[in-house]
Structure formats: structure tokens, C-alpha cells
Amino acid sequence: DCFIEKTHEVYYRHFGKYFGSVIQGIFYEEPSFAHFAPEDGAYPYNETAAERYRARVGRDLIADIRDGVEASNVYYQILGELFREVFLGKVRDWCDRHGILMTGHLLGEGDACSSARCSGDAVKALRCFSMPGIDEIFTDTALGSTQLLPYGSLQAAVRKTGKDGLCELFALGPTDLPLSR
């Protein structure tokens, strides 16, 4: 709520007359509950998520981690639920109310493990976007070398929302990517 107030509401106060025409959407660059792809054994912590973990599995998250009980699958799914509830969903609602698209792409969308550690469930997270996207800045162009998780996640989100997809085709790298590509 604070993020929306300090950013989006300010944008709207200054540029609201352009929303829906000149300003058609806001691009979200790699939102995540982790801000990085944690290594094995690293867990971002949230008290609400730990409480939901206890309610879901009947055990204490910290004790499970300490005792070597595999907690990541359930815990990352719970973190993903919270991510959608307290960030992605709220931002999408704000964008819808102001007549603009919520677009962008997620952090860690290259493989299933990184994706789970950054957004819980890439498909569910991308469904929060009114125009979901993927980050395709790599030079791989052949179908055999395409990263199937981002492609499949984007396709699922596009089918669900009925909207086109958006792809970040060029960023600050890789340095071998010619402008023509």
C-alpha cells in the first residue's frame, strides 16, 4: 500500500490526464519476494508465511529447516500466494481502476527452481499482469535452445487473460547482442 501511494498515486497526480492514452501501462521489471534467486537452503522469511506454513503442514517452519525437513516447496508456494495478495494483485487492481495495463516480467523466470524461489508459481504470478511478459535478452533464437519455462508461462498467462504478451527484447545485455537482433 505504501509503495502504491509513494509511486503510482504520485504518477497519477502528475500525469493522470495521459493515463489510457499516452501512458498505456506501467512496466514492472522483475518483481519478486526474494529480489534474488536464493541458493539451496536459503529462505526469505515472512511471519505471515511461517504461520500459514504451520497451518498447512502442522509443523514449525524454522524447526523444519533446522531439522533438515524439506520445507521449500510448500513455503515458496505460500510466499507466492502472499506475493500475489499483497503486491501483484494490489498493483493490478490499481492499474485496472486507472485504465492502464500492468505489464512486465518476473525475476528468476529461466528455470522452475529459480522461478519458485522468486515468485512461488510463475504462471499464477503472470496471471496477475494484464499484459504478461518475459525477459528474452539472450541470443538463443532456435526453438531447441529456447527457455521453455518463460515461454510456457507467458503462453499460459496470455491464454488466461486473453491479452497479448510483452517481451523485453533488449536491455543492458548481453554485450554480444547486436542492435539488429
Image (spheres, grey):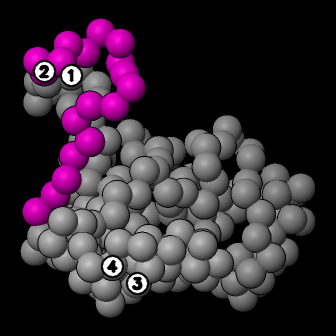
Q: Quadrant of residue 156?
A: bottom left
Closer to us: 54 or 133: 133
Circle number at residue 140:
1
Relative to 85, 13 lies left or right: left
**Which segment did they paint magenta?**
164-181
Label 4 is placed on what type of residue? Gly
Identify residue for label 2.
Answer: 181
* Tag 2 secondary structure: loop
Residue 157 in view of the camera: no
Per the image, the residue denoted by label 3 is 94
| Tag 2–tag 1 contact (CB < 8 Å) | no
Which dot, 4 or 3, sits closer to the camera?
Answer: 4
**Nearer the observer, 139 or 1:** 1
At label 3, the amino acid type is Trp
Whole-number angstrom distance, CA of label 2 to CA of label 1: 11 Å
Q: Which mark is residue 16?
A: 4
* For discs 4 and 1, the disc positioned in front in the rendered view: 4
Dot placed on the residue nearer the N-terminal end, 1 or 3: 3
Q: CA distance from mark 4 to mark 1?
A: 39 Å
Lateral position of residue 1 relative to residue 166, left or right: right
Circle 4 Cα neighbour tier, 10 Å, few/some/many (<14 / 14–19 / ≥20): some
User: Residue type at mark 1?
Assistant: Asp
